[in-house]
Image (cartoon, grey):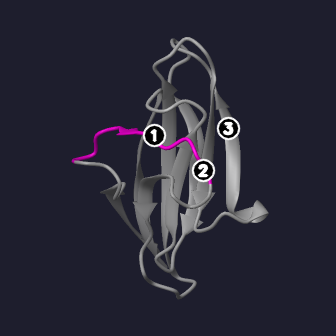
Amino acid sequence: MPTYQKQALSGSTDGRPIPITVTTPGGTGTLIHTATSASAENEYDEIWVWATNIDETAVELGVEFGGVADGDHIHINVPGLGAGPLLVIPGIPLQNGLVCRATASVASDVNVFGYINRVIT
């Protein structure tokens, strides 16, 4: 039976939202989470992240999962103020010390928050 341990994102201070301040993609984005250093298939971090936009205009959010190659990132359009939290990382597994980072088309307009489930099967 798998065990789950809920933890704050490592890029967060005390579970608080993380403002995305970096606008240039390429591996230097704002830290969201550094995954477990485990490399076995049975241990990983399941990442859950929501985004909010504090501006009235939509902002593009880029999320990198351990790298900057085409297959390592996603882009999400975060609607303007009043749209509410938007699920942007729906439980994607990451391990082996890989780092999840984010950039935004406008600095400090998008905040992300969430948690990880450390899973051991």
Mark nearer the N terminus (1 vs 2): 1
Q: Point out the stretch of residues depicted in magenta.
A: 14-25
- Say what amino acid the circle numbered 1 marks: Ile
Q: Name the residue under label 1.
A: 20
Q: Residue furthest front?
A: 24
Tell me what residue is drawn at x 51 percent, y 60 percent. 100
Is the residue marked by circle 3 packed among few (<14), some (14-19), or many (20+) residues within 10 Å? some
Residue 20 belongs to magenta span: yes
Q: Name the residue under label 3.
A: 76
Residue 84 versus residue 5 in the image, above or below: above
Distance CA(mark 1)–CA(mark 2): 10 Å
Q: Which residue lies furthest to the bottom in this view?
A: 40
Mark nearer the N terminus (3 vs 1): 1
Tell me what residue is drawn at x 48 percent, y 33 percent. 107
Distance CA(mark 3)–CA(mark 1): 13 Å
Residue 99 versus residue 106 in the image, above or below: below
Dot 2: what SS? strand
Q: Mark 2 points at which residue?
A: 63
Q: 115 or 13: nearer the eye?
A: 13
Mark 3 in CB contact with mark 1 (< 8 angstroms): no
Main SS type for the magenta part? Answer: loop
Mark 3 in CB contact with mark 2 (< 8 angstroms): yes
Residue 108 versus residue 68 in the image, above or below: above
Dot 1: what SS? loop
Is the residue marked by circle 1 packed among few (<14), some (14-19), or many (20+) residues within 10 Å? many
Distance CA(mark 3)–CA(mark 2): 8 Å
Q: Which of the two marks, 3 or 1, is nearer to us in this view?
A: 1
- Say what amino acid the circle numbered 2 marks: Val
Q: Position of residue 80 (x, y in %)?
A: 58, 16
Tell me what residue is drawn at x 42 percent, y 75 percent. 36
